[in-house]
Amino acid sequence: MTKVKVAMDWLAACAGCEMSVLDTDERLVQLLEKIELTSTPITDLKHPPKEGVTVGILSGTVNNTTNLEVAKEMRERCKVLIAMGDCAVFGGIMTMRNFFDTNEALKRAYVETESTVDGIVPSSEELSRPIKAVPVNQVVKVDIHLPGCPPSADAIYYVLSELLEGRIPVLSGENLKYD
């Protein structure tokens, strides 16, 4: 039996969503009998395969130019895209930065912090540029929104199980929590 290919990546995030994936415990082993994790922050940070995957999962906020590129690449390379967690679904805590001048935020982060000595704001063509922090669906089409901070292991398992059965998950009850 051919396994369903699943790719995951994170944007501006704390890793709470990825911990919830691991919290599926022995159910993760059951899922791995049916899915192949091609790329994930849990195992390795690499790009989803060029030939594509069935399911792409993004956690975190689109917060800089690199996040934007990652979101676009994932959308291009997956059939079904899941925005997982409050940051990916709503923008999360990172959107608080939108209320402040970007240059002032960079100055505070790189120059004025208590632990910084002779700090400078990094500037290089290779570094990401900050952009307005937004949820994933404001930059690419999202097929399934899985909220929660983080979403429960049960909700993640439910969504993936439904997709494996060929159904679009309908989130309600305990699977639709905003913690």
Image (spheres, helix red, strand yellow):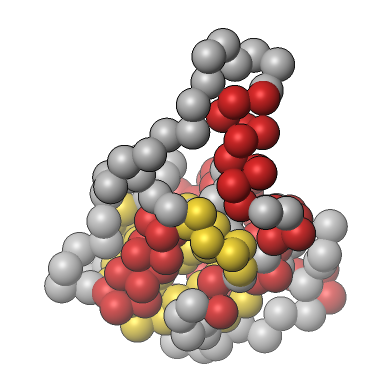
Where residue 22 appears, as percent x and y from the top left, is 55, 44
How many numbered marks have been drawn onto this rendered protein structure? 0
Residue placed at 39% from the left, 50% from the top? 128
Where residue 26 appears, as percent x and y from the top left, is 54, 46
**Closer to the camera in the image, 24 or 144:** 144
Residue 31: quarter of image: bottom left
Q: Is residue 124 above or below residue 2?
A: above
Residue placed at 70% from the left, 70% from the top? 90
Q: Is residue 162 left or right of residue 4?
A: right
Q: Is residue 120 above or below residue 68?
A: above
Image quarter of the N terminus: bottom left
Q: Is residue 156 left or right of residue 178?
A: left
Q: Is residue 95 left or right of residue 48?
A: right
Residue 173: quarter of image: bottom right
**Closer to the camera in the image, 64 or 6:** 64
Residue 95: quarter of image: bottom right
Residue placed at 58% from the left, 40% from the top? 106
Image quarter of the C terminus: bottom right
Where residue 156 appears, as percent x and y from the top left, is 60, 63
**Closer to the camera in the image, 26 or 92:** 92
Q: Is residue 32 left or right of residue 172?
A: left
- Residue 72 showing in the rendered view: yes
Instruction: Kindly give the residue lying farthest to the left in the view shown.
Output: 51
Residue placed at 38% from the left, 39% from the top? 123
Where residue 133 appears, as percent x and y from the top left, is 61, 62
- Residue 151 showing in the rendered view: no
